[in-house]
Image (spheres, helix red, strand yellow):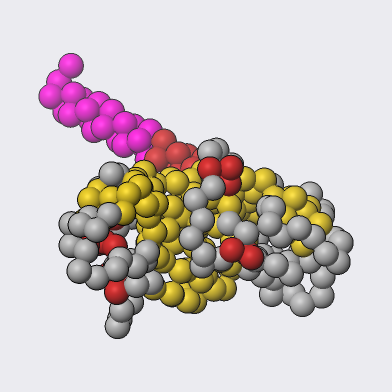
Amino acid sequence: MDKKKKILISIVLILFIIVVILTFLVFSKFVLKANFEKSILPFANKNQDVIFNINQIVYFSNCDAKNKNISTNHYTLENIYQFTDIAFFIDSPQEEKTSKNTLKSVSIENINFSTPPKLGEPALYFKSINNFAKSELNDENKINDKLDFNISSQDEADLNTPILYNNLANPITLSYINSNIKTDYTITDTSSAITYDGTLLPKCNVSLDDISCNFSFDVLITNNMDEKYKCTVFVDVPLTTQDKSIENGSVTVKDDVNLSFYRYE
């Protein structure tokens, strides 16, 4: 075979390989596009309209402790804990209540402490709206894996238990509690009476950095059409505002948010 034929065959072979590669790339792109559209279009079609959302979250942060011993020359505290009560409504942009925007079931799931505090034992609890902003440490209300709310259409319900009106009339109330920040801690300065609030922190040598925490949880809804919705709520435990710190007592924060539930089933 002469040199010209060898060069010609090499060129043809190279062109063939290039065509094969280009064909493969085009085909792969087509398949990826088709798969993407197949997976994303049904999701987009289900979520053209916002059915449920959260517009505002209210936080109240404070501290408390259990007294173990009080004498003339010291105080001993058994359990110093910081708590943040959380309240928010599940809202709907549609004012008229239908089977689309009313509740059949609601649960709190997937609690994740992404940045846990350096001191203490964090957990999330159900909190009665009647006890909101009050110190309460009730292990019966601790959420271990998930919290299922009972759904009611009655005019009156026992709001000391996890109950939500199906027409979105009452808020979800929870309490983040970081317990055992310090245990059996003795305060020797008895020149002034101790106050059971955030002022305990500096008295017990606890810094805000020691108890700062970020966590999240999912709110899952099934409406009365058996459609399923989900929203993830991220919480940066508020310990300060622009003009106040929990070390001075307590902190209240109203956070305007725009969290939408997406339909996943």
Residue 190, percent from left and from top: 21, 64
Residue 55, percent from left and from top: 57, 73
Residue 77, percent from left and from top: 31, 50
Is 175 left or right of 118, judged from the image as shown?
right
Q: Quadrant of residue 130?
A: bottom right
Which stretch did the figure color magenta? 1-23
Q: Closer to the camera, 138 or 69?
A: 69
| Residue depicted at x 71% and y 60% | 159
Residue sitting at the far top: 1
| Residue depicted at x 29% and y 62% | 200
Is 241 left or right of 107, judged from the image as shown?
left
Residue sitting at the far left: 3
Q: For the N terminus, which image quadrant?
A: top left
Q: Closer to the camera, 52 or 79?
A: 79
Q: Main secondary structure of the magenta part?
A: helix
Q: In the figure, 16 relative to 127: above or below?
A: above
> Is 10 within the magenta?
yes
Q: Closer to the camera, 14 or 120?
A: 120
| Residue depicted at x 40% and y 40% | 25
Residue sitting at the far right: 154
Residue 32 visible in this rendered orientation of the protein: yes
Residue 153, percent from left and from top: 85, 60
